[in-house]
Amino acid sequence: ISHLENLGILRAENNKIRGSIPDEITMLENISEIWLQDNYITGEIPQNVGAMKNLENLKISGHRGLVGTLPPSLFELSNLEFLYLNGNSLIGSVSENIRQLTKLIDFRINDNSFNGTIPDAIQFCQELEILDFSHNDLSGTLPSGLFKLSTLQYFYLRANSFTGSISEDIGQLTKLIHLLVDENKFNGTIPNSIGLCQDLEKLHLQESGLHGTLPDGLYDLMNLQDLYLDRNDFSGTISERIGDMTGLLDLRLYENRFSGALPSTPGFCEDLEILLIENTNITGTLPQEVCALTAKNLFSIEYAALRADCYSGDVNVAPFIECDCCDTCCDHVTHECHKIIT
């Protein structure tokens, strides 16, 4: 392969290629794109990968046999725009030398075994639009440099061990479309500045250690489609302003400490398909405006779409919620749920 000195693009994705990546590949000085994803590659990334100075697109994902750490020379690929290393078995940390990849647009290392923290030097990757560090062993707090990535649109940190709070500086990421940071060990509250991220369509914060009441800014997200807040320690009431979020398709509030009655305004969310509010302290009667959605949307999917604490296994204890339209009713005490047959 080293004799193909004029080769500009190598595409061999979705084949049955086995074995390691030959060191000779690094002699291809004119190559700009390498696509090797979804094969059966083993071994390590060549240590001299940085010799391919014209490389703009490097995709080596989907190889559980690809092991080892990121070679230091990888961070010398100053023309790199797309770096896909997801779905491998890579270990180690992300170097502060990430600062040298200033043209990077799309960086994916999800589904590996990376550890350590996110380097603050990530702030120098000012062209980043997609950043996916999900499903690793990363930890520590989120560096301030993350919130300086003003072009970021898709931001995924799911299933790691990040701690600390989510900074109010999140409001600087005004181009965000997806923010999925669930299944971490954060503390603190949802920052009010989240309302400045007006393009957000998906906000996944479930099982992330957050608490407190929902900030007013959250209800400013008119384009939000998915709001997952389940399995945290949120409290307080659900504001009537939730009806302002008319783009909502999927609202999950279960397993929190919300209280009071559910307002009727979710009924204004005419496209709502999933509403899960069981195992909270929400009480009262489910509003008819919400029930009116069931005929249109909420029963149109295969799994439970409208779930609430509308069942009691104790004849002497009334259910938390009265509901004539839920497709699944749960017991607030035992968490036992029953599908309603209609």
Image: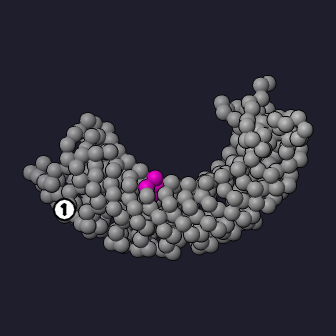
Residue drawn at x 25%, y 44% is 41
Answer yes or no: is residue 149 visible: no
Q: Nearer the viewer, residue 176 or 233?
A: 233
Answer yes or no: is residue 276 visible: yes
Q: In the rendering, at what x and y percent does residue 227 appear?
A: 66, 52
Residue drawn at x 13%, y 54% is 24
Q: How many residues crowd around disc 1 within 10 Å: few (fewer than 14), some, or many (20 or more)?
A: some
Residue drawn at x 36%, y 72% is 96
- Asked whether 86 falls inside the magenta stretch, the response is no
Seen as rendered, the residue at the extreme top is 342
For mark 1, what is the residue? 48
Q: In the rendering, at what x and y percent does residue 212 appear?
A: 72, 65
Q: Nearer the viewer, residue 12 or 134?
A: 134
Q: Which residues are magenta?
A: 132-136
Element type at marker 1?
loop
In the image, 46: left or right of 167? left
Residue drawn at x 88%, y 41% is 317
- Asked whether 134 falls inside the magenta stretch, the response is yes
Q: In the rendering, at what x and y percent does residue 118 appear?
A: 43, 67
In the image, 73: left or right of 291? left
